Amino acid sequence: MQLSQNEVVFGNAKQEGASQGGWFIGHFINSLEDARYTEDLEVKWAVHKAGDSRTQWAVNHEATTLSILIHGRFKLEFEDSAIVLSNEGDYVLWRPGVSHNWVAESDCTILTVRWPSKSGDSVSM
């Protein structure tokens, strides 16, 4: 991440999120002075190989989540349905309290935005 004289932040989401599971904007940024620190939302850039998965169910108690497919094929499972993102720009949005897991059906890239950004809100079930 770099900071210009006008406090415009730019960088690479994949590189900056590498040490935090892809998350590069949110409450988990270590410095309050960093423009990427916010409790309003969190943003994740995720690159998955075919077969990568989260087999354990997870839920956010306060946050709404939006996942957008950049490329590839990605399946999200919910308690009563499964959604396959297969076309660039396909998305799924779910509200707090909705359990989910996922599997990358092909090599893919996903952009996820979650709001608000609260420590401990995302828990495995």
Image (tube, helix red, strand yellow):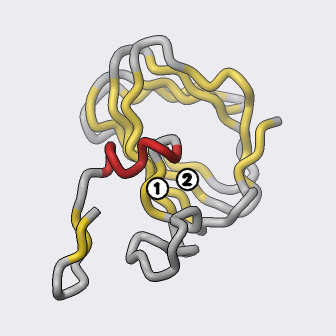
What residue does disc 2 label?
Answer: 65
**Badge 2 or badge 1: first in the primary sequence:** 2
Residue situated furthest left in the rendering: 5
Residue 17: where, in percent of width, then height? 42, 48
Q: CA distance from mark 2 to mark 1?
A: 6 Å
* Circle 2: element type: strand
107 vs 14, nearest the viewer: 14
Disc tally is 2
Q: Is residue 55 left or right of residue 22?
A: right
- Looking at the image, the residue that sits furthest to the right is 125
Disc 1 packing (10 Å; few <14; some 14–19; many ≥20): many
User: Extreme top residue here?
Assistant: 51
The quarter of the picture where the C terminus appears is top right
**Eyeballing the image, is 34 above or below 73?**
below
Mark 1: secondary structure: strand
Rendered residue at 17%/86% (across/down): 5
- Would you say 50 lies left or right of 89 here? right
Residue at the spot x=55%, y=53% of the render?
A: 65
Q: Quadrant of residue 48?
A: top left
Q: Position of residue 84 (x, y in %)?
A: 45, 25
Residue 54 sits in which quadrant?
Answer: top right
Where does the image place residue 86, in percent across and percent down from the top left? 33, 25
Q: Quadrant of the N terminus?
A: bottom left
Within the image, what quadrant is residue 22 found in? Answer: top left
Q: Establish if 41 lies above or below 104.
A: below
In the picture of the structure, the residue carrying the numbered disc 1 is 113
